[in-house]
Amino acid sequence: GILTLLTEWSRKERELWEGGRASGAIYHGNEKFHEFLGKAYGLFSVANPLHPDLFPYVRKTEGEVVAMMIHLFRGRTSRDDDDGGCCGTLTSGGTESILLACKAHRDRARDLRGIASPEIVAPTTVHAAFQKAAHYFGMRLILVDVDERTGLVDVDDVRRNMTRNTVLVAGSAPNFPHGIIDPIRELSELARERGVGFHSDCCLGGMILPFVERLQADGRLDDVASRPDDDVDVDVIPPYDFRLPGVTSLSADMHKYGYAPKGASCVMYSSEELRRYQYFVSIDWTGGIYASPTLAGSRPGGISVATWAGMVHLGEEGYLELTEGIIRTTRAIREGIRGENGIDGLEVIGNPLSSVVAFRSTSPKEVNIYGVGQAMAKNGWNLNSLQYPSCLHICCTNLHCGKETAFLTDLRSAVEEVRAHPEKYAGGSAAVYGMAHSIPDATLLEPIARGFVDALFSG
């Protein structure tokens, strides 16, 4: 019956990603581990954190997950400070975490500083969730260009774009497009000097960074480190978390490199006072006094419990082992493209330190990078196509471990194929992105994008 049908659908979907050729999406991939998470979820599938009196153990797991996340990102505890120390809430994903952090800073600035036209200042590479937050909450998002070679934003450019209406500065560790860690130390200190908030978005690879630092400190990645440049270790992870006094909020997704079920993220704050601006409270509703911490009212308690179960099951050693494999794979791909025997016609954008490697064509007229993506797709690789600049990226996961040689071999062949037969790769994504770059008014593409979303919900 129904379960037989669902089993078949699941099997067919698994065939699309279990070979380890899709960028991101599935971060662990082990069937037994996924079954473990599914059983944990199933035990609490009817649970709703909106009713903590009925589901006290869901509340317990949520509190413990937040505590583990605060510890991971070096947050101060209530024992350290009179203001309650770092705190947070669970959310449905990185987008909601970012939305809530923006709302909290907006409402606090309106309450304490009387700012009626709030602004966010951030690099162009921050997640689109900041655009969504500005759209939803009546804020202005000021995007600052990054260096095309390094992928880094100039802190002085950010300073020049701040005004008396700035309520939040944001940066990524790392960013989604290129896997570059923004200068979080400098940006957060600038925000602190100006008396405004700073959000460190660690949603994509943030949960991997603390374990990369541990592995590097223990010397377990020395054999795959980049060669130092001018006596500077180019693979050192710059600070990005609550060690920096200017960081007032931070987001990280457990459903990526925390290996939790989809729908699990955490937004954290430097104080309980700031977190309270995230909440919604109605004291005069006819249904009674209503208070909710996030955008949703009812939430799936099973996801919270399964997230807790996965984190406790893996433990620090489990995360270290997974991280080591992923980082070794990522660095092999990074150096395989840009190293001495790298791929002619491609260059890596910046110096990615986490799990994402973005690369572009050095001669776009000879090698169309989107054509390379199409050629890779013929070999089963599902890469992300990006723009401004035109490039591709691979987000490495546990499923990619051991496949770095196959990836580089196929990538080298794809570049040669596109260079030799450009006419074969003039359609598809190459044509779509080429059209997007040539249209004077990009808003003309919005109806197309909205139509695509419409189609997702058709019968």
Image (cartoon, grey):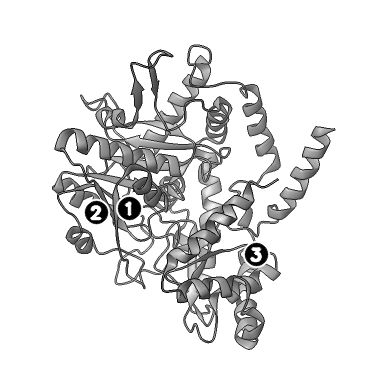
Q: Residue at x 59, y 50 (%)?
A: 454
* Mark 2 or 1, nearer chain start: 1
Q: Position of residue 395 (x, y in %)?
A: 53, 58
Residue bearing mark 3: 381
Q: Position of residue 387 (x, y in %)?
A: 46, 68
Foreground: 331 or 361?
A: 361
Q: Residue at x 53, y 72 (%)?
A: 336
* Mark 3 or 1, nearer chain start: 1
Q: What residue type is labelled 1?
A: Gly
Q: In this view, does 273 lie above or below 226?
A: above
Query: Are circles 2 and 3 on residues that touch, CB within 8 Å?
Result: no
Q: Residue at x 49, y 16 (%)?
A: 51
Q: Distance between the residues labelled 2 and 1?
A: 8 Å
| Residue 183 shown left or right of residue 225 in the figure | left
Q: Find numbered disc 2 in the image and state the secondary structure of the residue it sits on.
A: helix
Q: Find numbered disc 1 in the image and state the secondary structure of the residue it sits on.
A: strand
Which quarter of the picture shows residue 448?
bottom right
Q: Distance between the residues labelled 3 and 1?
A: 30 Å
Foreground: 368 or 239?
A: 368
| Residue 333 shown left or right of residue 212 in the figure | right
| Residue 372 shown left or right of residue 123 in the figure | right
Residue bearing mark 1: 171
Other residues around mark 1 within 10 Å, as few (<14) / some (14–19) / many (≥20): many
* Mark 2 or 3, nearer chain start: 2
Q: Which amino acid does label 3 sit on?
A: Trp
Residue bearing mark 2: 187
Q: Residue furthest right?
A: 1
Q: Which residue is drawn at 71% across and 45% down?
A: 459
Q: Distance between the residues labelled 2 and 3?
A: 36 Å
Other residues around mark 3 within 10 Å, as few (<14) / some (14–19) / many (≥20): many
